[in-house]
Image (cartoon, rainbow, N blue to C red):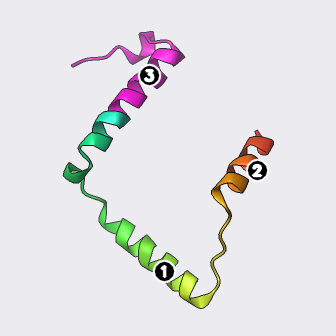
Amino acid sequence: MNIAINQMTTAEKIRTMEDIWDDLCHHAEEVASPSWHQDVLLQREESISKGTETFTDWEIAKKKICEKL
C-alpha cells in the first residue's frame, strides 16, 4: 500500500497514525520489545530501590505539560 503522505492534510496524517497505532495495539503480542528496554527497566528499578527516582501523579504531570504549551 502506497500512501502519498506529502499530499495528505495534517488531519489525515494524524488519523492515519491513530489507525496504525490502534492496529498495532490489537496485535501487541506480535511486536517484540527492543533489547534495550530491559536495560532501561533494570536501571529504573535500581533507582527506585536506591530512592533516587521520583514520581509525579499523572494528572499533575498532564496539567504541568499543558501549562508549558
Residue topped by disc 3: 15
Task: Indicate which disc residue 45 carries.
Answer: 1
Q: Residue at x 38, y 66 (%)?
A: 37
47 or 34: nearer the viewer: 47
Mark 1 touches mark 3? (CB < 8 Å) = no
Q: Residue at x 56, y 82 (%)?
A: 48
- Residue 57 lies in the magenta stretch: no
Residues at marks 1 and 2, CA–CA distance in whole angstroms = 25 Å
Position of residue 34 relative to residue 45, above or below, is above
Would residue 25 be found to the left or right of residue 43 on screen? Answer: left
Circle 3 Cα neighbour tier, 10 Å, few/some/many (<14 / 14–19 / ≥20): few
Position of residue 33 relative to residue 13, above or below, is below
Residue 2 position, x and y percent, is 25, 17
Label located before the other in sequence (1 or 3):
3
Q: Secondary structure at mark 1?
A: helix
Q: Quadrant of residue 21?
A: top left
Would residue 69 be found to the left or right of residue 52 on screen? Answer: right
Circle 2 Cα neighbour tier, 10 Å, few/some/many (<14 / 14–19 / ≥20): few
36 or 45: nearer the viewer: 45
Would residue 11 be found to the left or right of residue 39 on screen? Answer: right
Residue 32 position, x and y percent, is 24, 57
Circle 1 Cα neighbour tier, 10 Å, few/some/many (<14 / 14–19 / ≥20): few
Q: Secondary structure at mark 2?
A: helix
The furthest residue to the top: 7
Residue topped by disc 2: 64
Would residue 59 be found to the left or right of residue 21 on screen? Answer: right
Q: Which residues are magenta?
A: 1-20
